[in-house]
Image (tube, rainbow, N blue to C red):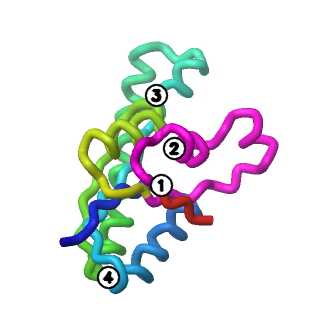
Amino acid sequence: MPVQVLVPVDDSIAAHRALQYIIKMKDQIPMSVTLLIVVPESQLKYHGFQVSQLDVIMAQSVSHCEKIVEKHRLELDAAGILTDTRVVTGDPAEVICRIAAGEGFDFIIISPNSAGKLSSLMFGSVANKVVHECSTPVFLLR
């Protein structure tokens, strides 16, 4: 029986690194992978957009993310890995932890973006928050 793995992704080198690791490990650990992109809503609200503008921007963001996650799905499918995809909105770390716990994932594979030590110190990274806040085991890939 394959383990259920949640993999938060985006269009970064870090996400690509996580996918390459999954492909490399597919024979050692049979996995069923759910690729997840969380479109952050809160960052847009702080930029002074009107509600109608926010709706358009969010719709475009979700559409763009659906294309990204589909590209990643095709890469894993080509490697013979059973893959599901999701694009949702909300606070990324909160949504990742909620989905992982609520849907019984065995673990999360996440690779932090290299935003820089100062940025991570001041604002925290999604990966850092996931490691510290999720009850589901987290495999942090550097």
Q: Is residue 102 magenta?
A: no
Would you name the residue on which mark 4 appears? 79
Name the kind of residue labelled 4 in the image.
Answer: Ala
> Real-space Cα distance between discs 3 and 1?
24 Å
Quadrant holding the N terminus: bottom left
Q: Is 46 on the left-hand or right-hand side of 94? A: right
Q: Which mark is residue 138?
A: 1
At a point 27% along the width and 66% down the height, the residue shown is 3
Q: Is 142 on the left-hand or right-hand side of 18? A: right
Chain-order first, disc 4 or disc 2: 4
Name the kind of residue labelled 2 in the image.
Answer: Val
Chain-order first, disc 4 or disc 1: 4
* Pointer 3 local density, CA inside 10 Å: few below 14, some 14–19, many at least 20: some
Please name whichever residue, 12 or 53, is drawn nearer the observer in this view of the structure: 12
Would you name the residue on which mark 2 appears? 130
Q: Is 46 on the left-hand or right-hand side of 104? A: right
Chain-order first, disc 3 or disc 1: 3
Q: Is 91 on the left-hand or right-hand side of 14? A: left
> Real-space Cα distance between discs 3 and 2?
18 Å
Identify the secondary structure beneath mark 1: strand
- The picture quadrant where one finds residue 32 is bottom left
| Front of the two marks 4 and 2 | 2
The residue furthest bottom is 27
> Real-space Cα distance between discs 4 and 3?
33 Å
Residue numbers of the magenta segment = 109-137
| Front of the two marks 4 and 3 | 4
Name the kind of residue labelled 1 in the image.
Answer: Val
Instruction: Answer above or below: position of 50 versus 3.
Output: above
Would you name the residue on which mark 3 appears? 41
In contact (CB < 8 Å): disc 1 and disc 2: yes
